[in-house]
Amino acid sequence: MTQSSTTVQKLTAGAAETWSKVGDQQIFVSDLIDQGTVPEAKMTVGYARVGQGETLTSRFPYDEVLVLTKGGGYTVRTEQGEALTVGAGDVIYLPADSTNTFEAAEDTEMVYVANPPSVYAEHVAASMVDQ
């Protein structure tokens, strides 16, 4: 459903209609605002769920912010060896082109915000081709 960016919207996890599985892990994502739903949006916003014990190493070509809403002991390890462990209520900024390893000590839920949305969309499309 395409909506105008001039319309104020309230979004909840229950609004996530489609969840995509990341690889063969218990990691699921659902974009709520993206180029398909709000073409004028200057960001992509969605929810992610990560199962306890899951680990993922990734390099994103866009800036991303993670806002943890559930869970604790979620660790982000940088290429430089720095480890940031966060929990519900914490925010993590991931600069474009940084490579990070994500580890969930327990079931974790978060909101993600990615910018620019066109680069995010290209990255997701390319990763779907590889699966």
Image (tube, grey):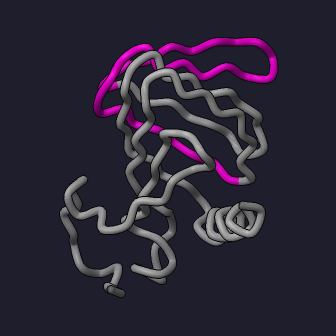
Direction from residue 81 to residue 114 in the image, left or right:
left
Query: Mostly what secondary structure, the magenta segment?
Result: strand
Q: Is residue 73 magenta?
A: yes
Q: Is residue 76 magenta?
A: yes
Direction from residue 79 to residue 24 in the image, left or right:
left
Observer-nearest residue: 98 or 123? 123
Q: Position of residue 80 (x, y in %)?
A: 81, 17
Res 3 quadrant in image: bottom left
Q: Quadrant of the N terminus?
A: bottom left
Above or below for 82 versus 131: above
Direction from residue 89 to residue 25 in the image, left or right:
right
Q: Residue at x 57, y 15 (%)?
A: 84
Q: Residue at x 80, y 23 (%)?
A: 79
Q: Position of residue 61 (x, y in %)?
A: 74, 53
Q: Position of residue 50 (x, y in %)?
A: 44, 35
Q: Quadrant of the C terminus?
A: bottom right
Say how many tags the image has: 0
As drawn, which residue projects farthest toward the front? 24
Above or below for 83 versus 7: above
Direction from residue 69 to residue 119 in the image, left or right:
right
Res 45 quadrant in image: bottom left
Observer-nearest residue: 69 or 38? 69
Q: Position of residue 68 (x, y in %)?
A: 37, 32
- Residues shaded magenta: 62-89
Res 4 quadrant in image: bottom left
Above or below for 36 versus 65: below
Q: Residue at x 35, y 36 (%)?
A: 109
